[in-house]
Image (cartoon, rainbow, N blue to C red):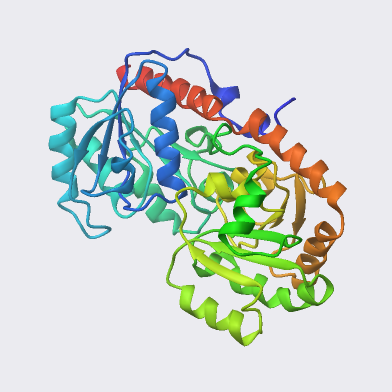
Amino acid sequence: MESRLKPHSYEPLLRLSYHPGMRIAHIESGRHLYGGARQVGYLIDGLAGRGVANILICPPGHALAALRPPAALRELPMRGDLDVGMIGRLRRAFAELAPDVVHVHSRRGADLFAGLACASASSGPAAILTRRVESDEPGFWARFKYRPYRAVVAISRAVREQLCGRAGLDPARVPTIASAVDTQAFAPDRHARARVVREFVLPEDAFIIAVSAQLIARKGHAHFLRCLPEIVRAHPRVRVLCFGRGPLRAPLERLAAALKLSAHVQFPGFRDDISVVLPGVDLLVHPAVREGLGLAVLEAMSAGVPVVATAAGGIVDAVTDGREGLLVPAGDRARLSAAVQRFAADAGLRARMGAAGRERARADFSIARMTDLYLRLYADVRARAAV
């Protein structure tokens, strides 16, 4: 299948083949295994399979380090946006570890301080940064923060437009490389539904909806909950599982109770085994107001589950409306409710769009594809740094 992302990916810019044997230092400054950290793990696995030596630099106790990816581990204190001492700690680590390329994967101060650490070293490594969020930042600040980086990778067209348009970065420095999904782990499983029904004590004939996202405002949970009374009146067998952690859990539980939805909505929390749960649901709803790309959407597609999502940010790069799922305008409750009800009433539609999503995930969002694109980018920036 021809990739729909091809005109917007890094592929038109590629000139050099990748070089196995490179040393790549990956900086991940968060603590939890959210979507961005999972992407780091996927990339390290893919690179290791190509003969690349990886170094993971992260705070002590990072959940990704506990998974023991194929990388040398260097734990450093990373205390956020005000931790200026991070510059010195990173400079010393780079001098000792001698990476060919430093790849910064997160914010929390790492996006600023890692770039400065590379730029201030006498012979610092080439540095790139992956930006995963679609959010505005002042142009003068973005140009200063990203100046040390040879490339600032956008994971979607929406992120690229923010960086090149509102932030004012040179488009030549902003390739697009989409996030990936583990298409082997996230795969259709005919036994999954029975496990989900049993574990969450659901009716055998339930129409099971998953929402898989941090419990924060921009993910749009409250917006979806306010649609549910209408959906439940039309389809009383609807049951919703809201997977994820975050500061809005208690307010969302109170909202569900106030809307008399307690019998229809559960908040099971964060699941590190979401790959065994998703194939057992009928539909994923992703009502985000802003989204860099939407890893949960990719995971559902890979598992053969159709999607209802808002046409926000990079989601439109993942889902073609009417093919892998249905897209609705952000904030449009009537359209969101209608889309969910359409799937609830049509098993054939669910099967067709679920199969299309699986095909799309394997073609355009595989770990192998993402790895190849990053390898070529590493080779490119490394070659330019040597000139």
Depth check: give the residue in front, 168 or 128. 128
* Left or right side of 377 for 96: left
In the displayed structure, 6 sits above or below 349; it is above
Seen at 50% across and 22% down, the residue is 372
Residue 294 visible in the snapshot: no
Q: Quadrant of residue 227?
A: bottom right
Report the residue that reaches farthest toward the bottom.
258
Seen at 38% across and 32% down, the residue is 150
Seen at 22% across and 52% down, the residue is 78
Image coordinates of residue 98 in percent, x first then y, are 20, 24
Q: How many marks?
A: 0
Image coordinates of residue 56 in percent, x first then y, are 28, 35
Seen at 53% across and 68% down, the residue is 267
* Left or right side of 111 for 367: right
In the displayed structure, 215 sits above or below 186; it is below
Image coordinates of residue 325 in percent, x first then y, are 76, 49
Depth check: give the residue in front, 186 or 195. 195
Quick one: quadrant of the N terminus? top right
Residue 82 visible in the snapshot: yes
Image coordinates of residue 96 in percent, x first then y, are 13, 28
Quick one: quadrant of the C terminus? top left
